């Protein structure tokens, strides 16, 4: 059970129960060099969501700040999510 988001399940029966009630489509991405929110935590959260969404991996050398720096890869992921399509299994960034 992920421990980085303990508040999300507080008063909702725990994280698994809270995420199990999500009724919208979820798109998830993670940065392979992010040490603050590593990919294994993204994958653990995805497993608790209905439909178990795939976690798109964005490759970057810049760690947690990559979501700000890798605007092309992150933008492509967001565009694909909003259009309801696949983002292309893994995005390659600088």
Image (cartoon, helix red, strand yellow):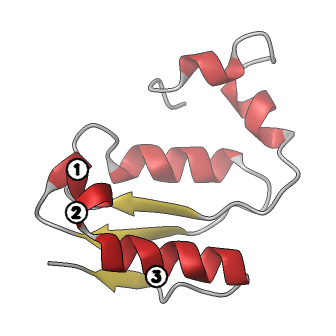
The answer to whether residue 27 is above or below residue 75 is: above
**How far, Cα to Cα, is label 3 from label 1?**
17 Å
Instruction: Work out whether residue 89 or residue 83 is closer to the camera in this orientation and state it.
Output: 83
The residue tagged with tag 1: helix, strand or loop?
A: helix
> Horizontal and vertical percent for residue 82?
68, 75
The answer to whether residue 10 is above or below residue 31 is: above
**Mark seen at residue 78:** none
- 79 with respect to 64 (left or right): right
Residue holding disc 3: 76
Number of residues whose C-alpha sits closer than 10 Å to that of mark 2, classed few (under 14), some (14–19) or many (20 or more):
some
- 40 with respect to 59 (left or right): right
Asked where in the image residue 6 lies, by quadrant, the reply is top right
Which mark sits nearer the N-terminus, 3 or 1?
Answer: 1
Residue holding disc 2: 69
> Horizontal and vertical percent for residue 45?
58, 44
> Horizontal and vertical percent for residue 94?
14, 78
Residue holding disc 1: 65
Number of residues whose C-alpha sits closer than 10 Å to that of mark 1, classed few (under 14), some (14–19) or many (20 or more):
some
The answer to whether residue 71 is above or below residue 72 is: above
């Amino acid at each position: 059970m992920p421990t980085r988001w303990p508040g999300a399940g507080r008063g909702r029966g725990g994280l698994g129960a809270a995420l199990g009630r999500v009724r919208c489509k979820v798109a998830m991405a993670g940065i392979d060099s992010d040490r603050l929110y590593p990919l294994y935590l993204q994958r653990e959260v995805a497993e608790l969501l209905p439909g178990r969404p795939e976690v798109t991996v964005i490759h970057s050398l810049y760690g947690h700040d990559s979501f700000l720096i890798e605007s092309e890869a992150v933008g492509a992921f967001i565009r694909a999510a909003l259009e309801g399509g696949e983002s292309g299994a893994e995005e390659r960034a600088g």
